[in-house]
Image (cartoon, rainbow, N blue to C red):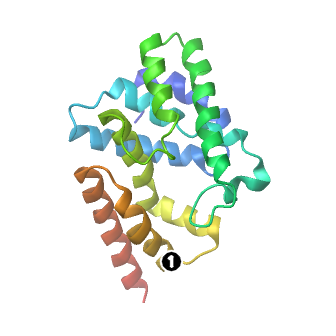
């Protein structure tokens, strides 16, 4: 699943991904990003794939007691969402420097991390691809279960959030199509349970 050149990044990121189910979220997002890249040849896998592995490492720096109130529909501490981007970019810079990545790549990767949640417009194709893969995870069965657990809400409530609040934020047609397919699948599974 991981490209050989991305495994050292993953191993360096892992100690920072043990909060919020970020380890699993990151791997799902990595696979989703690989699929998006198949339809976006202008995207640079050598920028976006390392970025997605590192994009949420900054959540490790957010106080544990405020973590689940730093994002989502009723966030109480929006400044901590921004903090995770700033801290994540700084940690990513250290990791990539230790792995001897070229300075230009480090700059591009950390620029995407710094703003991947709080900047709502895409600053580049690579930025759009990372944002889309990050959001698409929410539509996976794992994402839906995780959101349900985080906010103590029902699956239909999660699906409503995805449909009405997350769906309008997609930046690309391919991201919207993938999200709609996964949402349709989740609705179909809910109907089977009735």
| Image coordinates for residue 26, horizontal then vertical, percent | 51, 43
* Location of residue 16 (image quadrant): top right
* Location of residue 94 (image quadrant): top right
Seen from the viewer's position, the closer of residues 94 and 185 is 94
* Location of residue 38 (image quadrant): top left
Any part of residue 26 in sight: yes
| Image coordinates for residue 59, horizontal then vertical, percent | 65, 43
The answer to whether residue 145 is above or below residue 52 is below
Residue shown at the point (61%, 34%) measured from the top left = 86
Quadrant placement of the C terminus: bottom left
Q: What residue does disc 1 label?
A: 157
Left or right: residue 34 versus residue 90 is left
Left or right: residue 191 versus residue 26 is left
Any part of residue 17 in sight: no
Seen from the viewer's position, the closer of residues 134 and 185 is 134
The answer to whether residue 78 is above or below residue 116 is below
Quadrant placement of the N terminus: top left
**Label 1 element class:** helix
| Image coordinates for residue 11, horizontal then vertical, percent | 58, 27
Residue shown at the point (79%, 55%) measured from the top left = 65
Residue shown at the point (42%, 18%) measured from the top left = 105
């Amino acid at each position: 699943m991981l490209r050989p050149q991305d495994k050292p990044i993953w191993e360096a990121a892992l100690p920072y991904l043990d909060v919020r189910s970020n380890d699993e979220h990151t791997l799902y997002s990595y696979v989703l990003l690989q699929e998006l890249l198949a339809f976006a040849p202008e995207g640079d896998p050598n920028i976006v794939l390392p970025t997605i592995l590192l994009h949420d490492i900054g959540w490790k720096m957010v106080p544990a007691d405020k973590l689940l109130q730093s994002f989502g529909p009723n966030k109480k501490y929006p400044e901590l969402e921004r903090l995770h981007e700033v801290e994540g970019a700084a940690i990513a810079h250290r990791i990539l420097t230790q792995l001897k990545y070229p300075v230009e790549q480090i700059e591009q990767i950390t620029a995407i991390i710094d703003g991947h949640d709080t900047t709502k417009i895409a600053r580049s194709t690579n930025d759009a691809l990372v944002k889309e893969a990050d959001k698409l995870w929410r539509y996976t069965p794992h994402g839906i279960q995780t959101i349900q657990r985080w906010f103590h809400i029902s699956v239909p409530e999660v699906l409503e959030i995805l449909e009405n609040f997350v769906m309008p934020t997609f930046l690309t047609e391919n991201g919207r199509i993938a999200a709609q397919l996964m949402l349709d699948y989740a609705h179909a599974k809910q109907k089977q349970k009735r």
